[in-house]
Image (cartoon, rainbow, N blue to C red):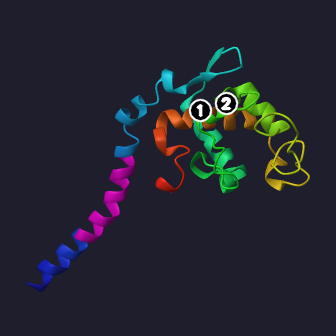
Amino acid sequence: MVPFLSNLRQSLSRLLIVLPVLAVLWISSPAQAAAWDAEILTVPSDPEGTAVTFSEQQVKAGRKVFNTSCGTCHAGGITKTNQNVGLDPETLALATPSRDNIASLVDYLQDPTSYDGEYSIADLHPSMRSRDLYPAMRDLTDEDLELMSAYILVAPKVLGQEWGGGKIYF
């Protein structure tokens, strides 16, 4: 009876090791990849609405840059310092100028202005202009800013209401 229990214990140990691997494989299966189609990966490039399609790898790279550079204050598309202004599509579209396209988000990341566009907030918000104050911005390239912007615009298509949902989801 003891060898049986020992074998059972070994089998369960192996199963506990294999299950997470299987979960990762299942999550990244072709069915998951199909969800990242061209429609989801296509976002407005400029205020005129010219579309640009990013690859899944580019959006994931943008997510990594976003999490490293902006995630402390904007985890999940919220704004911890001002709950009234998030990174959801509606809020971005209603900003002045609107920030619902790649060019406008890159412009904001280079030299941010208040939500109404009236004055610079570069001393308060991390940006390329204030990178001497914000180390997370120092090594970012224009490509990094574009990939981060792509992630910000693709995330609500993938996450839905969770992006910018605040305390409900986090």
**Along the horizontal axis of the image, is 57 left or right of 8?**
right
Residue 46 percent location from the top left of the image = 71, 19
Residue 169 at least partly seen: no
Q: Amino acid at mark 1?
A: Glu
Considering the whole magenta stretch, tell me its main secondary structure. helix
Q: Are marks 1 and 2 in contact (CB under 8 Å)?
A: yes
In the image, 170: left or right of 135? left
Write down the residue under mark 1.
90
Q: Residue at x 88, y 38 (%)?
A: 119
Q: Quadrant of the N terminus?
A: bottom left
Name the residue: 89% across, 55% down: 133
Residue 16 among magenta residues: yes
SS at circle 1: helix
Between residue 120 and residue 64, name the one nearer to us: 120
Amino acid type assigned to the residue bearing label 2 in the image: Leu
User: Residue 42 placed where, x, y %?
Assistant: 56, 22
Membership of 66 in magenta stretch:
no
Q: Nearer the viewer, residue 117 or 130?
A: 117
- Assign a secondary structure to mark 2: helix
Residue 44 place in picture, x, y as percent:
64, 21
Determine which residue is flagged by label 2: 94
Task: Give the magenta-colored segment's residue range.
Answer: 12-25
In percent of the image, x 72 and y 50: which residue is there?
69
